[in-house]
Structure formats: structure tokens, C-alpha cells
Image (spheres, rainbow, N blue to C red):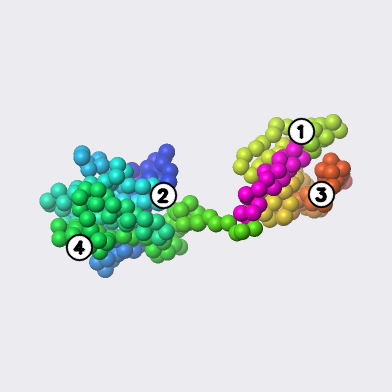
Amino acid sequence: MDENLFISIEGLSSENLATQILAYILSNSSYATQQRIIYNIVFDDNELKDTHNRRAGISTQEHFEHFGRPDLIVDSPNDYAIIENKFWANFSKGDQFIRYAKLLESLETAGNKHLILLCIKSRLPSLQENILSQYKAANETYGDIDALMSHLKSISINLKFILWEDIIEKITGSGFVVDSFVKFIKSRFLHQISFSEEALGMINSQKIPELLDLLWEGVDQVRFSLNSQGYSTDRMSQSRGIYGFSLKQPFGSLWIGLYFLPWKKYNTPYVIMFRKEWISDDYPLERVQDSLISNQFKADSDLEYVYPIYFSGKLIIDEIMPIITDVISKVNNRMAE
């Protein structure tokens, strides 16, 4: 496989992305320690050998006519392992697992043959049930997974189920790439979303969409009001959790609007925000920073400088507009001193 991580994962997502990064870790000599840990989980042989010492080849999505494209293959003189990664996807064509078992059975010169299903804990029972259903549809009925494992063992195939939770627990703390990979797996696949009864009550009503409509409309009203007072506003910016606009000032640009991230931090949906990259070339950065901090902007590790706009629920224009114009005036006056 390509030794450049970014080339190897370009255009990939979800299961294929995770598989390719795992393959990169197993292929790159910089991760020999992690390789030994992973192989000990996969083969359970206590040899503590890395990929180089096992003389193993790593491949992904290799095509086998009539059998398909296994996610990941580890091929060494002693072992031949097909590792199929499943997060949320189902088995393809209704017989994917059987096809991979038959592929292993057809390999006469391979070492110890391993068929590995890599998945998250919450999906293991349904995937095992699906595997038994595949065999039942092919007129091979096994009472449970243990019975299937015994059958496969009789034709020299070791069936094993490995949990992502077990792998990431043991390789955490292994440097930027591996730790970022662990965080990706946790946030995308292991974090299970659930709602409290109170939250469900709000979701299953008109409250949230009505409130968001009011908050977005409030941003529009503030922008129109500033324009009518002679301020120069720029284009709107909007995405998931962001709705606002830029406001041109002599020292650079401010951003005003609704932003979910500071909302979670400061308990108010509306903020005035400034970033260093928005500064005018005519103003020293230290001078602008001093003016912002002295007028109650908060130095924020994610957003640089944030002024939370607190309001009590009165008319948006009557309450928020004086706050915004007062802060802008004070910042500019401070820089003029």
C-alpha cells in the first residue's frame, strides 16, 4: 500500500477510511509497538512481533474473483488473516461472510487461516445473528456461533470477533496519528447518541424549530438595523451551528451572530467575535487585543476573542442593538487614545 497516509486515504470515508488508517499503522515501521499490540489481539499468539518481524504483507480491498474484496488482509508465512471491518454497514449481497470463508478454504498454500470480524460492541450480537442467517439461507444451519466456529475450525479456519473498543484502549497514547485515529473512532462510531425524556419532549414539539427561527430572524434584524445606522456589514456566513455576518471597522472586521460553540461555553446564542487574521494592516495587533480585552472580550482558545451578548428576552432590537453599538464605540475609542 502507499506509504503516504494522506494519499492512501484520499476520498475515503467511514469504514473504508478507518480500515485504510489501520492498514497504514500496520504497514509503517514507525508503529512497530502498536503493530505488536494489534497482532497479539488478532492472532492471540503472544509472539509480540511487528509486521517486519512477521514478514507480513498488508493489503486492502484486494479483488478476488467470485469472492469479493476483503477490507484488510495480513499475509505472512505463518498466518493469513482476512479482517472485515463493520461499523454500521451490513454484509454485502447477503453472503459476504460465507464468500470470505470459502476464499480462505480455497487457499491451499496459506499458513494458519483466520477470518476476523472487527466491529463495535453494540453491533456484535446483530452481526453474529446475520452470519448465522447467511449460512441458514445457504442450507447450512448452526445452532449458535460456537457451533459455526467449530465447523470452520474443522476446515482449518479460525473465526474470531474483535472489538474496536479493545484495540483503541490498548493503542491510545501512541502519538499524533494514532491518537487522532482513536479520537476519530470514538467520536464517529463509539459515541452513542441518546436523549433524556426532557429533551425528547422538546424534540417532539414545535419549540426548537420555532426558537431557532426567532434566533435567526434576530440576526437578520440586527444586521438590517446596523446598515440603517450607517454601519458597513458584509456577506452572511451560515453553516451547521453558525449564522451571522461581518461588520467592517477601521481596525478590521468583527463577526456578529448566532454560534453554537460559544453558546455552549457562555450560555448565550449571540456573540461578537474577532480573529487576528481579520485585522487591518494599519493597526498593531497588540493595540487591537488591548482594546478588546479592556472592553470585556474574552480570550478564547477556539475562537480567539469573543464578546457574549446577554439579553433578557425583550425585543431584540431594543435590547441587543445598544449593547453592540456601545461595545463597538468603546473599542474604537480605546484604540484612539
* Residue at 23% in and 58% down: 142
Q: Position of residue 95 (x, y in %)?
A: 26, 46
* Residue at 14% in and 57% down: 155
Q: Is mark 1 on a helix, strand or loop?
A: strand
Distance between the Cα atoms at labels 3 and 1? 25 Å
Amino acid beneath label 4:
Ser
Residue range of the region highlighted in magenta in the rendering: 199-220
Q: Tag on residue 313?
A: 3
Dot 3 crowding, Cα within 10 Å, few <14, some 14–19, many 20+: few
Q: Which one is in front, 331 or 105? A: 105
Q: Mark 1 points at which residue?
A: 233
Dot 2 crowding, Cα within 10 Å, few <14, some 14–19, many 20+: few
Mark 2 or 3 closer to N-term?
Answer: 2
Residue 214 lies within the magenta run: yes
Q: In this view, does 272 lie above or below 159?
A: above
Mark 2 or 4 closer to N-term?
Answer: 2
Magenta-drawn stretch, dominant element (helix, strand or loop): helix
Q: What element carries label 2?
A: loop
Residue 62, quarter of the rendered image: top left
Dot 1 crowding, Cα within 10 Å, few <14, some 14–19, many 20+: some
Q: Name the residue under label 2.
A: 88
Q: Which one is in front, 138 or 164? A: 138
Distance between the Cα atoms at labels 3 and 4? 68 Å
Distance between the Cα atoms at labels 1 and 4? 71 Å
* Residue at 32% in and 57% down: 128
User: Which quadrant holds the N terminus?
Assistant: top left
Distance between the Cα atoms at labels 2 and 3? 43 Å
Residue 284 lies within the magenta run: no
